[in-house]
Image (cartoon, grey):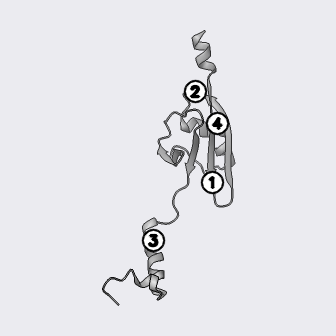
Amino acid sequence: MAQADAAARTVHVTVCYARPDSVFLKELDVPEGTTIAAAIVGSGLQQAFPEVDPSTMRVGIYGKLKTPETLVREGDRVEVYRPLTADPKQARRRRVQKTRESGTREGQKWLRGGG
């Protein structure tokens, strides 16, 4: 009887994936012991967005990076992350340079000793 109870247990999870033009958000019940990759496949995300490959894309639970083999727990929000389109360091450098070139006092505070 204990084995039947263990097999019948499910956990409620949410799978989400965001693109600039649309959002995929699906709640589903999966068997206890399901991995992140299996939850993504079970949600139908790959049918809606064929470019999603959980084995190569970064995934996480509530903003914390995890491996696709991580087991999901009750109430987890499984997130599939898109690759970055811009290098964050380069983007920050461009913003700072633009502020410096504007000639405002805010832009000048970055220039120490130079004028």
Q: Nearer the viewer, mark 1 or mark 4?
A: 1
Q: Amino acid at mark 3?
A: Arg
Estimate the spatial distance between the alpha carbons at disc 1 and disc 4, rounded to whole Å. Answer: 18 Å
Q: Position of residue 57 (x, y in %)?
A: 52, 49
Q: Position of residue 75 (x, y in %)?
A: 60, 36
Estimate the spatial distance between the alpha carbons at disc 4 and disc 3, rounded to whole Å. Answer: 38 Å
Q: Residue at x 67, y 49 (%)?
A: 24
Q: Amino acid at mark 1?
A: Ala
The residue under label 2 is 32
Q: Residues within 10 Å of mark 4 (few under 14, many from 20)?
A: some
Q: Nearer the viewer, residue 102 or 106?
A: 106
The residue under label 3 is 92
Q: Residue at x 56, y 31 (%)?
A: 34
Mark positioned earlier in the residue sequence (1 or 4): 1
How many badges with numbers are in the image?
A: 4
Q: Quadrant of residue 26?
A: top right
User: Image quadrant for the C terminus?
Assistant: bottom left
Mark positioned earlier in the residue sequence (1 or 2): 1
Q: Amino acid at mark 2?
A: Glu
Q: Residues within 10 Å of mark 1 (few under 14, many from 20)?
A: few
Tell me if residue 10 comes above or below residue 56 in the rendering: above
Q: Nearer the viewer, mark 4 or mark 3?
A: 3
| In the displayed structure image, the side of residue 25 where residue 90 appears, left or right | left
Q: Secondary structure at mark 1?
A: strand
